[in-house]
Image (tube, grey):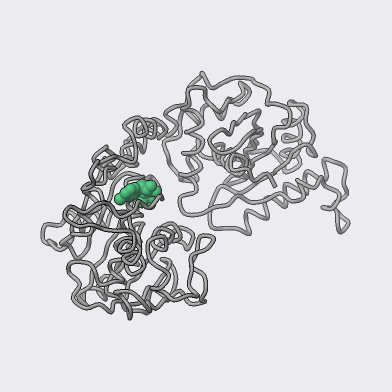
Amino acid sequence: MTAPLVGPVPGLVLDAETLSARAALHGRAPAHWTRPQQQLFDSPFKLTVWWGANGIGKSVALAEVTRRALGGLLPWQTTRKRTVMLVGNTYKQLGVTLEYLFATVPSSWFGPKIRFQSGMVKGQRMPVYDVVGGPGAGSTLVLGVFDAENLAGPRAEVVISDEPLPESVHNELWPRLLGRGGRMYVGFTPTLGTASDVQYLWKLVDDPSLPHVGEIHTPLTLDAVTPRGGLVELPWLSARDIAEHEAGLSALEADMRMGRSRTPRRETAYFSAWGPHLIRDEAPPVGAVVGVGIDHGPKPGTQRAVLVASARRGLHAHLWVLDEYASTDRTTPRGAARGVIDMLARSGLEPGDVDLWIGDRAHHGDHRGGAMSNRAFLEAMAAELGIGTERRGWTEQLPASLRHMKTPRKYEGSVWEGSLMLHRLMVDETPRITVSSRCTLLHADFAGWQGSTSPSDPYKHGLDGLRYIAVPLLEGRSR
Ligand SMILES: Nc1ncnc2c1ncn2[C@@H]1O[C@H](COP(=O)(O)OP(=O)(O)O)[C@@H](O)[C@H]1O
Ligand SMILES: [Mg+2]
């Protein structure tokens, strides 16, 4: 975020000295806020649910609520010494909000040792920080992640979350908060990843007998990204930025990510930009990185492997889906290994030419299971390559990249982030993904998947195999 300087205030001359003195005491937040952001700060509700599009300044404003809460500066706060809890799904995700907070709070607030560095607050082991300077001296900032025991203990007057709380966490924190006359601020963008989990929240918001629970609903419009009150009011996104952002989204969840709907569109293919124009047999450039992604399937005979190549990174990354392999219910592990070796051979490759191998079972939560499936695959590959597996150390004889075959990185929402990444490749004027005519199963998967993560979804496993390998390659993690 570029933190604008404190802007001109009518009737008040703010010279540089006054400004820096003010910044040293209060920190340097954006000078102007959008209407929805201001609505959040002024919210009359005990539980404020702010839901809306990505990119409308929710995290920035929730960090500002945290700053104000610590400083005792929210309109309803009567005493200054406050315990403020900032909670999130993971410390990594909390880091987003914390980065904004530490960009605006002067270092004198938390003392010289505490600092924000590499995505996290550093300088102390316990995530409980005393405010020692500024208007909120005596307050405490408590950080916590949803599954941590530390959420069960401490009391707080203000709870702030940049993601929806799981119902169990909400039920744990809410009564304690109310007992102390406290308040809760929750902000999020509804996505396919959260859709099923926030029903309890919509129930609270929609219940007319709970007037102290309220929502702020903000779709992505120019108004939502225009800070108000400056001499000129300039949105930080243009109408074109907004249109391009929407074009990249899957039709299934565009209304959610644009902040227009709480629920996904029904009966819609996730890959709405998929089409036969993306089916091309194009050779990747020399020097492209080659990878194989494998989904071992929920039961024997449902294994899928995908061969891809990628070049460049980030916004310019390009993906070539070169080939696929699918087992049948009669395939032995050796047969699957042979199938993968044949797949490579059709592109003129050998196992040692592959830069990155990623494999996992289709079902989640069983990491040993995933590792065992990879192990079984490696053993079969070794046998196919003429390496005797009865002797210890046989893995040493495998090509290095195969020996170091990994399981995919999984985290809350990784399915949706990965799928969105693939979808975005399809929507550019010159699409950045081509899928070989050989990959007929994947063609059907792209056309048919409606976002179900059920292991019995027939379209899911091939796309899983593709995602496992495509995401690290697109992010430039090739080893
Ligand atoms: N009040 C503001 N003034 C200027 N820019 C802002 C303001 N609020 C947000 N922004 C800009 O919008 C970007 C996105 O904000 P963020 O809070 O991360 O959005 P969200 O959490 O809703 O996805 C920020 O990086 C910043 O550049
Ligand atoms: Mg955010």
Q: Which residue is at the front of the view, 374 or 174?
A: 174
Q: Position of residue 243 (x, y in %)?
A: 35, 30
Depth check: 159 or 4 in front? 4
From the top left corner, tell me how far across and down residue 137 is, in percent: 33, 78
Left or right of 247, for residue 48: left
Q: Position of residue 236 (x, y in %)?
A: 34, 41
Q: Is residue 58 left or right of residue 143?
A: left
Q: Give above or below for 141 relative to 466.
A: below
- Residue 105 location, quadrant: bottom left
Q: What's the residue at 74%, 26% (across, down)?
A: 346
Q: Nearer the viewer, residue 106 or 77?
A: 106
Residue 280 at x, y = what percent?
A: 59, 19
Q: Quadrant of residue 93?
A: bottom left
Q: Say if 135 sits above or below 196 in the image.
A: below
Q: 345 or 190: nearer the eye?
A: 190
Within the image, what quadrant is residue 161 found in? bottom left
Identify whether 229 is placed above or below 432: below
Q: Residue at x 88, y 56 (%)?
A: 391
The structure residue drawn at horizontal position 27% and vertical position 37%, both measured from the top left corner, is 222
Disc count in the image? 0
Q: Is residue 195 visible?
A: no
Residue 14: in sight, yes or no?
yes
